[in-house]
Image: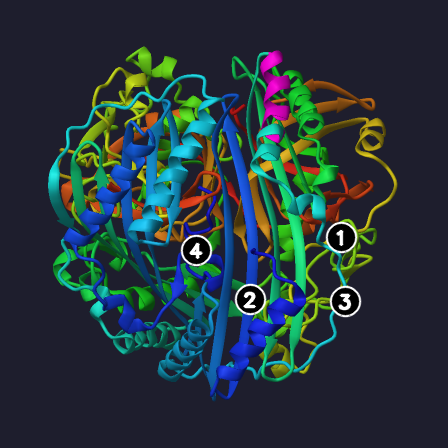
Amino acid sequence: MQMSGLGLGAMMLSEVPVVGSPVAEAQLLAPWLDAATKKKLAETALNAARDKGATYTDVRIGRYLQQYLFTREKQVQNIVNAESYGIGIRVIANGTWGFSATSDVTPDGIAKCAATAVAIAKANSKFQKEPVVLAAQKGVGDKAWKTPITKNAFEIPVKDKIDLMMNVNGAAMDNGANFVTSNLFFINEQKYFASTDGSFIDQDVHRIWPTFTVTVTDKASGKFKTRDAISSPMGMGYEYLDGLASEKIAGPNGLVGYRNSYDMVEDAIMAAKQAKQKVTAKSVEPGKYDLVLDPNHLGLTIHESVGHPTELDRVLGYEANYAGTSFATLDKWKTKNFNYGSKLVNIVADKTQPHTLGAVGYDDEGVPCKEWDIIKDGILVNYQAIRDQVQILGEKESHGCCYADDWSSVQFQRMPNISLKPGTEKRSVMDMIKGVEKGIYIIGRGSYSIDQQRYNFQFGGQVFYEIKNGEITGMLDDVAYQSNTQEFWNSCVQLCDQDDYRTFGSFFDGKGQPSQISAVSHGSSTTRFNGVNVINTGRKI
Amino acid sequence: MAILTKEEAKKIIDKVLAFSKADEISASLTGNRTGNIRYARNSVSTSGETNDLSLSVTAVFGKKSGTATINEFDDASLEKTVRRAEEIAKLAPDNPEYMPMLGAQQYVDTNAFVESTAGINPEYRAKAAFGSIEPCSKKNLTAAGYMQDRSGFTALGNNKGLFGYNKSTFVDFSVTVRTADGTGSGFVQRDYNDVSKLNTGTATEIAMQKALASVNAKALEPGKYTVILEPTAAHDLILNMMRNMDGRSADEGRSFLGKKGGLTRLGEKLLDERVTIYSDPTNTEVPGSPFAADGRPQEKVTWFDKGVVKNMYYSRFWADKKGVKAVPSPDGIIFQGGNDSLADLIKGTEKGILVTRFWYIRTVDPQTLLYTGLTRDGTFYIENGQIKYPVKNFRFNESPVIMLNNVEAIGKPVRTNGSLIPPLKIRDFTFTSLSDAV
C-alpha cells in the first residue's frame, strides 16, 4: 500500500527497505544454526514462557539475508549485502498477546526475551476487552520446506550479476535510451518456527526481483518518457533470469510476455524502443473504452481492488488510521449474493502456487498453507484471515496467511497470493483484440491510487496501444483509467485462457504501524473490461 | 544508555578512526530510544519500545568504499568492524562518482532536543492513548490512532578532521475517528520536538468534530473548485514537489525543472509571486539536523523566492562537475505565509471546498508533476464564509506547480510533519471523480 516499492523501477537505495546490517558477500553463504540447535533454542523459549505463565507461545528464529545491486548506465552505484538474525517470541498470557524480540540468541537472552513477552501480555491484559480466541492448530511435528529453486542467487558471483546489468544497460542505450537504471534484488529468509502446539518447522524461502527503468529525453521539445521493466518479482532463484524461450508468450505487434523465465536484455531493448515511441505517441482522447489488460498490468489492479479490501483486519477497523477500512463489509458477505464482479470473475487466495512470492509450506503461525476462494462466480465468498480472526467468519481453521517481515516484527495478517482464474474457453490476446471496436491495450504497472475503502481507483500503465475495429493502430500516451471497484469487476466480459496466465508481483508491499513489508503475487491471464472511463493526464506547466 | 554525550561519542569515533589503515575512514554513531503505541476499535492493539545504539564505519581505498556496522563497543569489536569495512571496500568495484571525504565543517546549533520528550515512558504512552480513546468511547465514536516518539543522537567523524554531533527528540501523533455506523470520519495529526505541546485529548476533539460533521455527505459534481487545503493536505502535495528538486535530474532533462534545449528553470519564475519556500535548520518551531548524512552543513536555503526557482539540491559529485555549490536536500521546509488562520480563510470564501487531508497520492506524470489522490476524513462545502455541509470525497488530478499558480490566499503557517505549512486557498483545483469512501 504505502511503501514506495510498487512500480519503482528507478528507485534509489535510500527508498528501499534494508533490514539488518551490511556484511561481506561471503557471509551470505555462511551456514547458520542447524535445525537441531534451533529446536533446542526454541524449546528454551517455549519453556521459559510457560514458566512465566503463558498459555500459548510461538517462536520464530530467523536469519534474513538480502543482496541488492544498483547500477546506472556504465556504473555500479551500490551493492548492499545485509544480514539480520534473532528471535521473536509471541505469547498469550491472561488471554492477551505479548511479543518481544532479541538478537541475543543464547539460552539466557532467549529466556529474558520470553519473560518480557509474558510481562507485556500481562500488562496489556488490563486494557483488554475480550480474550484472544485462537483457532486450533494441530502440531505438525518436525517439518522442512524450501522454495523449489534450481540456482541459489546468493551463490552467483556479484561479477556475473554486474555483467548482466551492464549488458542490460548497454542494450537499452544502444537502442535509443538516454538513461537507464537497473536493479537486482535477492532475498533469502531462513526461518525456524516452533509453537506449543508441537510444531517445529524449518523453512528456506527465496525471492528475486530484476527490474530497470529506461528514460528517453527529447532536447528539442524538453519532453522525457520512461518505460519500466515488465519483469515480475518471483518466488524463484537466479534461474528466473535464464530467459527461456519456452516461457515467452508471443503477443500482438511483436510484443513479448514472460511467464516463469525472464529475458532482461530483450526487455531492455524493447523498453528503449517503446520509450522512444512514447515521446511522439498520440495523446489519448478521453472517454469510455474497452480495456484489454495484460497480466503484468492487471495484477496491480487485483492487488489494490480485491487483495486489500478482503483483508479481514481492514474490514474490522484495525487499519483505520493508516491504510483505511474496506467497502467489502461483513454484512455484504453475509448476504451470499454480493456481486463483486461479473460471473466470469473467480478470484482465489493461495500460499501454494509454485514460483509465487506468497508460496511457503507454513505461515508464520505454523499453519499449513492452502488455497481458498475469495470471489466465486462473481460473488464475495470469503476473506483473508488468521488464527485469531477466523472464528469471526464462523470457521475453525486459519487460512494460513500470517507473516512478519523480520524476526523482530510481530506477525499479523498479510495478503496471500490473490489471483484471477483464467478463462476456460480457448482464447489468445490476438483473439481478444479482434473483438474490440474501440479500446486500449495496457501493459505494465504505472501510476496507481485507490481510496481508503477501496471503491474509487485510478491506474496508469507502462505502454498503451489504441485498438480500433479489432486491430492495434498505434501507441497512445497520457492514459489513465478511473473506475469503481464493483463497477469495474462487473464490466469484466472476457478472459484469455490458461496459456496466457502469468503472475505479477509486489516485492515491498507495506502495511501496519510501524510499517512492515511483504511480497505477494497476483496471477491472471489477459482480461477485457468494457466501457471503462479513460482520462487524459497531459498537462502544461 | 542510547543517548551518548558529545564527548562520549567523540571518544568512540576517535578510537575507530585510529584503528584504520584505509585512505579515508568515517564513522557514524547513532543512538535512539523509540517508542510507540497503536490502538484501534477503542482498544490498544500494540505497543513497544526499542533502544538502539549503532556504529557504521565506512572505509575507502582510492575510489572503492565499504561499510560495516556493529552494536558492540569494546575495543576488539570496534577494530573488527573497521577491518570488515576495509575488507568490503577492497572487494568493491570503483565508484567513478566517488568524492573525497569532507574536512572540518562549521555547524549551526539547532536545539532539537527536549527533555520532556526524552522522558516519555510506557505509562505516558498508555495515558496518551487513553486520553484519545476515552472521549470517543463516551460519544459512541471509534478511534484508531498511533503515537510514536524518538529521542536520540547522531555523531559523525572522519580522518579528515570532520566532527559533528546532534541530538534531537520527536513525537508524532495521529488519530482517525469514525462514527459507529461508519458514515462519518475525521482525522488529526500533530508532531513536535517537545511533547509538552501535545495534548492527545484536545487534538482528538478535532477529529471527533469532523467525524460527526461529515455524516450524510452530499455528492457534488467533479470539476474545478476553489479549495481550502488545511496544512496537512497542502503539505503532502508541496513536499512531493520539493522531492523533485534534484539538480542533476533537471540538468539531465528528466525533471519538471528541465526544459527545451537541455536547459533548466533555475532563476525562472515558476510559481505565484506570493510563494516563498525556504529551509532553515535553526527555526525553533521545526528545528532540523545541522548536517546531512554525508557531513555537509545544513544552512538556510531559499528554494523559491517570490515564485522564482532559486536553488536545487545536488550530490557533491554533480555539483563539482557543474561548478555549483553542493546544497544538500533539506530536512523540512518553511512555506512563508501571512497571519490569517484557517477560520479566516473560510470566512473569506464565497464558494469552496475545505480539504482536511489527502490520501494515496501518486505521480501520474513526472514531467508536469501531475499527481492523483483523494480527499479523506473531513471534506466540506463552504458557502458565504461558512461550512454548509459535508461532501463526498473526490479524486483529484493536479500538479502542485499549477496549484501554486492558482493561489487565492495564504494563511499562517503551522507545523505539520516537520515542516511549517500554511493553509492555502486555491482556485480551479481539479477534482476528476467521486469516491464513496468514508
**Residue type of the residue flagged with mark 4:** Pro
In space, the residues marked 2 and 3 are separated at their CA atoms by: 19 Å
What is the magenta range?
Answer: B128-139
**Residue type of the residue flagged with mark 3:** Val
Can you tell which of label 4 and label 1 is closer to the viewer? Answer: 4
Can you tell which of label 2 and label 3 is closer to the viewer? Answer: 2
Residue tagged 3: B108
Can you tell which of label 1 and label 2 is closer to the viewer? Answer: 2
Instruction: Give me the disc on residue B334.
Output: 1
In space, the residues marked 4 and 3 are separated at their CA atoms by: 31 Å
Letter of the chain that mark 3 sits on in the rendering: B
Residue B268 shown left or right of residue B243 in the figure: right
Can you tell which of label 2 and label 4 is closer to the viewer? Answer: 2
Q: Secondary structure at mark 1?
A: strand
Can you tell which of label 4 and label 3 is closer to the viewer? Answer: 3
Residue B410 shown left or right of residue A105 in the figure: right
B337, above or below B209, in the image: below
Same chain letter for marks 4 and 1:
no
